[in-house]
Amino acid sequence: MHKEMIITIDGPAGAGKSTVSKMLAKKLSYIYLDTGSLYRALAYKGVKNKINFEDMEALNNLCSNISIVLKNSEGQMKVYVDGEDVGDKIRTEEIGLAASKISAYAVVRQRLLQLQREAGRNGGIVAEGRDMGSVVFPKADFKFYLDADIKERIKRRHKELLGKGNSSELLAIQKDMETRDNQDSKREIAPLKPTSSSIIIDSTKLSLQEVVDKIVRQMANK
């Protein structure tokens, strides 16, 4: 394995791809790129400014006037929206749903595509998202698609929210996750799905470390 590789990890919400990507990036001394945070960043400003995401003119203006800056901090990308470190502010269920919704629009995807590719220009990166292997980095050295049973994904999300001190109900999480799955997989532009060259890993019965170990073995065997 050489330092310039691009590794993509795609998959639905709750499959464990964020934590796995961070762990893998740390193991390889690569940069971790959470591309979902870019969509969340744009959605955050839209929600903050009470923009109607179905109003194409308003959405165009949002994309034209927002400043999204990525900064590498100890191997991880920090996202700044108009100079503000958005951090945990973009990690709410409301912002997640909004991000999933706006990701269906071409103007949004085009606005963020260049930013994502620039981040991976020199390789040495683990890029996590929904269309990293299919659209953003179609020539990535390794493409992984991480999936899990929806019941397990709901349980993981519930545990994650409780761990952050947020109150949450399983039924509400299930509804939100099913909505996001539907929006992500059925959108016309770059729908969530593995590519023909993706290595699919079912994480339902695997620990996060077992998933990382499996990815490393797959890479070593190529």
Image (cartoon, rainbow, N blue to C red):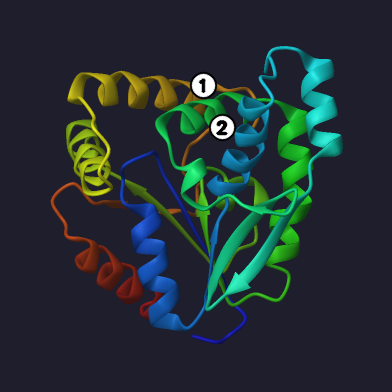
Crowdedness near tag 2: few (<14), some (14–19) or many (≥20) residues, C-alpha within 10 Å: many
**Mark closest to the chain's N terminus, 2 or 1:** 2
Whole-percent x, y for residue 140 in the image: 60, 64
- In space, the residues marked 2 and 1 are separated at their CA atoms by 15 Å
Question: Which one is in front, 184 or 165?
Answer: 165
> Helix, strand or loop at disc 2?
helix
Relative placement, left or right, of 192 versus 171 is right
Relative placement, left or right, of 164 versus 155 is right
> Helix, strand or loop at disc 1?
helix
**Residue 57 shows which numbered tag?**
none
Question: Which one is in front, 110 or 63?
Answer: 63
Give the residue at x 65% y 61%. 139
Relative placement, left or right, of 199 versus 195 is left
Residue 151 visible from this viewpoint: yes
Give the residue at x 62% y 72%. 72
Whole-percent x, y for residue 61 in the image: 85, 27
Mark 2 or mark 1, whichever is nearer to me: 2
Task: Name which residue type carries label 2.
Answer: Ala
Q: Which residue is mark 2?
A: 99
**Where 146 falls versus 213 (above or below)?**
above
Question: Which one is in front, 93 or 120?
Answer: 93
Q: Which residue is mark 1?
A: 186
Task: Name which residue type carries label 1.
Answer: Lys
